């Protein structure tokens, strides 16, 4: 692993990704872009729901354009699977009647939304195209829930579920029980590296088991292609579970042996690169993931707030010469 040559986070990632807009059923579509953040779309009898918004209103406009190719029903609901800026700052473009999130997600926006916004814009310049189009302030939910909320879009049942902590403490999935289609947010990734800088490593595998217990037949992950068969869904769940578990076990072993963070990072990076190094944003995520895992294995049960300044200091400490 060459140390002094890595550009911070995804600042060198400037190549546009090819967008796919896949129909999963008469009611469900997936907007995906080769490992960039996904957006889910649910089309009910009388309204449309958008799950995760893209990072800016200008980028959200492309989602809206594709929705309008298949329906003229009003976009009434935006659901935030969690609080990360890349998922929520495009919300204003949809002009929804309601923005829905778990209460835990709202609490995180209160606690760390401003810092997260500055941090993510610094990490992902390409994903924040026309960042000046983001309205001042943060994206705030107008409805919150704890555990479960059910909406009926006409005769279509849509369940919003908190099935456990993983990617964040507020993770929300959207479940269409009549069609066995699940929108997982970043609890599940496919051929893309899970970002775990705000994660709960000890909880995440069980949360994935809770997702699997729904027996989804199709699944839209947070990043990566839509999974359109039960076998593909199982592979997405298993791959995410393996990455999270193997990373945490490696970091926990190093911390228990008394090794300092940089040594544990290098060891864990090299170990996981053999199996996962080709996954999208692997080099970007690993410093954040290992830092959070080391924190959780030592003295910080809850994630510490990432700021733009902390991002850079961490990166220099782990990836510097």
Image: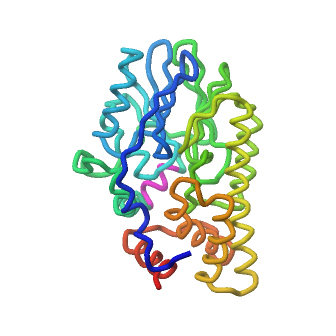
How is the structure coloured here?
Answer: rainbow
The residue at the far left in this view is 132
Q: Depth check: 46 or 318 in front? A: 318
Residue 115 position, x and y percent, is 38, 63
* Residue depicted at 67% across the width and 51% down the height: 240
Q: Depth check: 61 or 190 in front? A: 190
Query: Quarter-wise, where is residue 19 in the image?
Result: top left
In magenta stretch: residue 231: no
Which quarter of the rendered picture does the N terminus lie within?
bottom right
Q: Is residue 267 left or right of residue 13?
A: right
* Residue depicted at 58% across the width and 65% down the height: 289
* Residue depicted at 73% across the width and 31% down the height: 230
Q: Is residue 290 left or right of residue 127?
A: right
Residue 68 position, x and y percent, is 35, 20
How many numbered tags mark residues here? 0
Q: Is residue 45 left or right of residue 115?
A: right
* Residue depicted at 31% across the width and 31% down the height: 95
Residue 64 position, x and y percent, is 35, 28
Magenta residues (range): 105-111
Q: Depth check: 140 or 273 in front? A: 273
In magenta stretch: residue 106: yes
Residue 60 position, x and y percent, is 34, 36
Main SS, magenta region, reads: helix
């Amino acid at each position: 692993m060459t140390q002094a040559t890595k550009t911070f986070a995804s600042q060198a990632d400037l190549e546009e990704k090819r967008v796919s807009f896949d129909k999963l059923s008469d009611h469900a579509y997936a907007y995906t872009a080769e490992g960039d953040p996904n957006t889910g779309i649910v089309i009910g009898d009388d309204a449309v729901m958008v799950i995760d918004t893209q990072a800016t209103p200008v980028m959200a406009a492309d989602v809206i354009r594709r929705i309008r190719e298949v329906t003229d029903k009003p976009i009434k609901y935006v659901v935030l699977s969690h609080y990360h800026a890349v998922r929520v700052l495009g919300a204003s473009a949809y002009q929804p009647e309601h923005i829905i999130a778990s209460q835990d997600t709202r609490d995180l926006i209160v606690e760390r939304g401003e810092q997260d916004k500055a941090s993510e814009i610094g990490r992902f310049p390409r994903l924040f195209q026309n960042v000046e189009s983001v309205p001042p302030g943060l994206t705030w939910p107008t409805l919150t829930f704890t555990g479960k909320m059910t909406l009926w879009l006409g005769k279509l049942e849509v369940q919003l579920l908190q099935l456990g902590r993983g990617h964040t403490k507020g993770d929300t999935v959207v479940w269409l029980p009549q069609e066995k289609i699940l929108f997982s947010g970043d609890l599940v990734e496919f051929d893309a590296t899970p970002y775990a800088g705000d994660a709960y490593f000890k909880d995440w595998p069980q949360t994935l088991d809770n997702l699997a217990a729904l027996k989804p037949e199709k699944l839209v992950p947070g990043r990566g292609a839509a999974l359109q068969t039960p076998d593909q869904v199982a592979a997405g769940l298993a791959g995410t579970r393996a990455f999270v578990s193997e990373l945490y076990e490696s970091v926990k072993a190093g911390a228990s042996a008394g090794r300092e963070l940089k040594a544990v990072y290098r060891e864990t990076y090299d170990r996981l690169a053999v199996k996962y190094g080709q996954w999208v944003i692997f080099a970007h995520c690993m410093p954040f993931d290992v830092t959070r895992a080391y924190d959780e294995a030592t003295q910080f049960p809850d994630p510490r707030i990432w700021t733009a300044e902390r991002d850079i200091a961490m990166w220099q400490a782990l990836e510097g010469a």
